[in-house]
Amino acid sequence: MSDKQYILAIDEGTTGCTSVLIDKAGRIAAKTTDEIKQIFPQPGWVEQDPLDIFNTALNTARKVVHLAQADFSQVKGLGITNQRETTLVWDRRSGLPVYNALVWQCRRTAPLCEELKKRGLKELVKDKTGLLIDAYFSATKLRWILDNIPDGQKRAENGELLFGTVDSWLVWKLTGGLHITDFSNACRTMLFNIHTLQWDPELLEILNIPARLLPAVCPSGCIYGNTRPGWLGEKGIPIGSVIGDQQAALFGQACYETGDAKNTYGTGSFLLFNTGLKAIKSEKGLVTTIAWGLQDKIYYALEGSIFVTGAAVQWLRDGLKIISNAAESETLARAVPDTGGVYFVPAFAGLGAPHWDMYARGTVLGLTRGTTRQHIVRATLESIAYQVRDVAEAFQAETGQSIRQLRVDGGGSANRFLMQFQSDILNIPIQVAAVNESTAMGAGHLAGLAGGFWTDKSELGRLWQASETFEPGMTADQRQYLYRRWQKAVRHAAGWAEEER
């Protein structure tokens, strides 16, 4: 065993859990991933077994230390990052879940959300929480669980039950009873006031949620407590951070300053724009969120969620079967000089930020007899970049600031055609993170700061590196022409399914 020291980061995602060991130089010394099973009781419902969530975290954490041929005595801190909004309720005494976790994707509470909107609560919720009323967030999921277990409301009022998002559940289990969350997760529940930094009494009353259910809210980076002896080593490890996954990626990309922005290219894409110590109320279809709490300060961000980016490439592979793997999309896109006038709006389940059109549908425009699969593949990749620009334009309209450069991670960032086109259509440099596990890195960096493993953000900022930077090379006229055509295509896709109601 060497004398190296590490920070352990657990990234509990939606479909899998990744644990990484990070060394003093900011390098990943080891990494391992386990799958988390999703449960689909009926269309639109998505659940997970809370014990499965915990066991994947514990198992990957143990495995990654073993993989690095290290000992838990060398691990100086633990950071936790998680799928946000997923809702769990468990019994305070037994520690057993009272129902499966309702995953953020679950739409079962959409009718309750519509009812809240009809009651005229849209602006109240937005003013207090920065969020839209939507089944995406935790509040209505919690209400549903209390309504659908025996004596749920009574048990909650008696203090017998505890609520938490995934981070709270993991900390409670790992510590043997510490009931906490952090600002970045609390602000995604639709129950937390991002201005007073408290659970909001009026919102709790509207949904009849007893305050006794709720965890204490702490900074994203601080020493919460130690893991139970025996879980992760004989003595346990200090937990030094808890942070939601997209905010963790922003921190992991060293986007510490006002105006810094990152995008994660996954199944969908999440753009976050650091607005510093100021919460900017969005009028352009973005969400105002807390980025992190650190050293007695709260940092805010604007967030734009794009529903379908990488999923469109998966559709080419699995639906149309015109590519055999995601990497092939780059080769095919480069085989033609342009899309031949084809535009694809991948609104399979509506459009997210900044449009928020649940009735938009996937649309392919500009087809001719000369259209080939290469054109369709290229149009698919370009659609990802156009959607990112839609959100970037909204950022600029909200803040009066342009994004200076965009730091990127996720699977799509490996596609060099897409990254170049993204740079061209935004007219800014695109910096691809050298370490693609930005989410885990963010949680690890915060935990390392809390425990003194690293000195300050300046030291961490110097550790961040780009594997490649893409510079814009497109003319202004061409950029504007292409983007105007995209906007026209979006207008054609808008509201398509509305008449089906």
Image: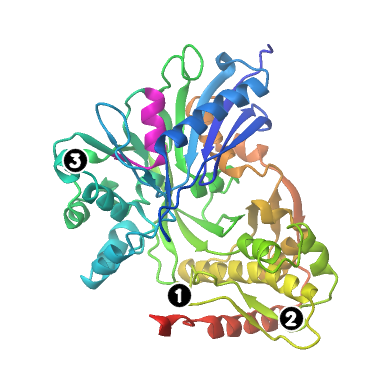
Q: Quadrant of the N terminus?
A: top right
Q: Position of residue 317 (x, y in %)?
A: 70, 62
Residue 5 lies in quadrant:
top right
Residue 118 lies in quadrant:
bottom left
What residue is at 51 percent from the left and 33 percent from the top? 56
Q: Nearer the viewer, residue 393 or 110?
A: 110
Residue on which disc 3 sits: 156
| Mark earlier in primary sequence (3, 1) | 3
- Per the image, label 3 sits on a secondary structure element best described as helix
What residue is at 29 percent from the left and 66 percent from the top? 111
* 396 relative to 385 in the view: left or right: left
Which mark, by number, is residue 357? 1
| Mark earlier in primary sequence (2, 1) | 1
Q: CA distance from mark 2 to mark 1?
A: 28 Å
* 143 relative to 185 in the view: left or right: left
What residue is at 45 percent from the left and 32 percent from the top? 54
Q: Is residue 25 visible?
A: yes
Taking 465 as reference, is 80 above or below it? above
Q: Is residue 166 magenta?
A: yes
Q: Is residue 279 magenta?
A: no
Q: Position of residue 468 (x, y in %)?
A: 76, 51
What amino acid is labelled 2 in the image?
Gln
Q: Nearer the viewer, residue 271 or 463?
A: 271
Residue on which disc 2 sits: 478
